[in-house]
């Protein structure tokens, strides 16, 4: 989904594929609407988002399937990328007011999430080579208060502090169905695929929290 350059409000990945929630782009929100909607009176926010996605995805041979959801309080648009097993649901800001979205000028959140996912993918591939197959894994994205925010912002001039996110994007990894051998192989792979001096916090007996820049990979069961 890098071509869309969208910030994931939520993300769940399991055996059924990936499901992401994202805000509609700003260019689609110039005209706002409220239902009721009909096939002949679609929400303009959704129509403009379709155009935006189609343009950004135009270099790929597998166009997404769009579904407009106009029966709720706010319009939604679902984009199903069948070949990739990814479903993205676009919402208006009012429909996601309880979720974290970066403030203007806050860059890097999506990039750090991407780095965490890339390290997880590399570690799973490395572990599968040792185990003879990749164990089943599910993950979800959450945003929690960054315990190191005050330390990060302490020496930053006041006008620039807003550029530092107060949250830590966390990839919660569900390894509840794994054997002790599978966990041990993956723990070793996580350390092998990390960078020099990467912070790894042990959690309980078999859990972990791997810090990837300003994001984190965390064992969901720990």
Image (cartoon, grey):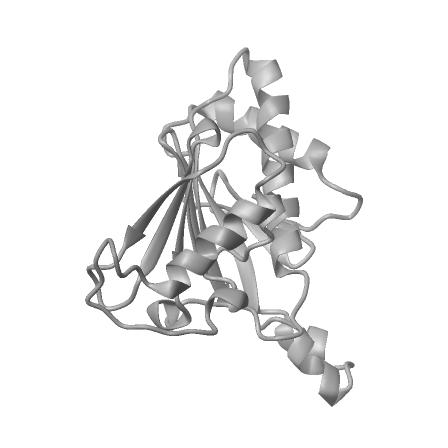
In-front residue for pair 203/26 = 26
Residue located at (50% from left, 68% from top): 101
Residue located at (24% from left, 53% from top): 39
- Give percent across and percent down for residue 213: 69, 55
Residue furthest out toward the top:
132
Above or below residue 186? Residue 169 is: below
Residue 198 placement, left or right of 181: right
Residue located at (19% from left, 67% from top): 36
Above or below residue 109? Residue 217 is: above
Residue 215, quarter of picture: bottom right
In-front residue for pair 15/24 = 24
**Quarter placement of the N terminus:** top right
- Give percent across and percent down for residue 190: 63, 35
- Give percent across and percent down for residue 98: 37, 71
Numbered marks: total: 0
Residue 93 placement, left or right of 52: left
């Amino acid at each position: 989904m890098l071509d869309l350059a969208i910030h994931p409000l939520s993300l769940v990945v399991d055996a059924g594929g990936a499901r992401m929630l994202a805000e509609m782009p700003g260019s689609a929100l110039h005209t706002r609407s409220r239902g009721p909607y009909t096939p002949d009176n679609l929400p303009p926010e959704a129509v403009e988002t379709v155009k935006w996605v189609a343009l950004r995805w135009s270099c790929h041979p597998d166009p997404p399937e769009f579904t407009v959801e106009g029966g709720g309080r706010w319009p939604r648009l679902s984009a199903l990328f069948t070949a990739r097993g990814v479903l993205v649901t676009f919402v208006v800001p009012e429909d996601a007011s309880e979720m974290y979205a970066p403030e203007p000028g806050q860059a890097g959140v999506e990039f750090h999430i991407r780095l965490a996912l890339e390290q997880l993918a590399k570690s799973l591939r490395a572990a599968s080579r040792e185990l003879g197959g990749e164990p089943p894994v599910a993950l979800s994205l959450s945003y929690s208060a960054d315990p190191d925010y005050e330390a990060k912002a302490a020496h930053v001039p006041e006008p620039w502090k807003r550029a530092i996110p107060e949250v830590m994007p966390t990839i919660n990894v569900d390894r509840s169905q794994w054997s002790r051998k599978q966990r041990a192989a993956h723990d070793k792979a996580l350390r092998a695929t990390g960078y020099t001096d990467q912070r790894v916090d042990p959690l309980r007996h078999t859990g972990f929290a791997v810090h990837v820049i300003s994001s984190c990979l965390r064992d969901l069961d720990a």
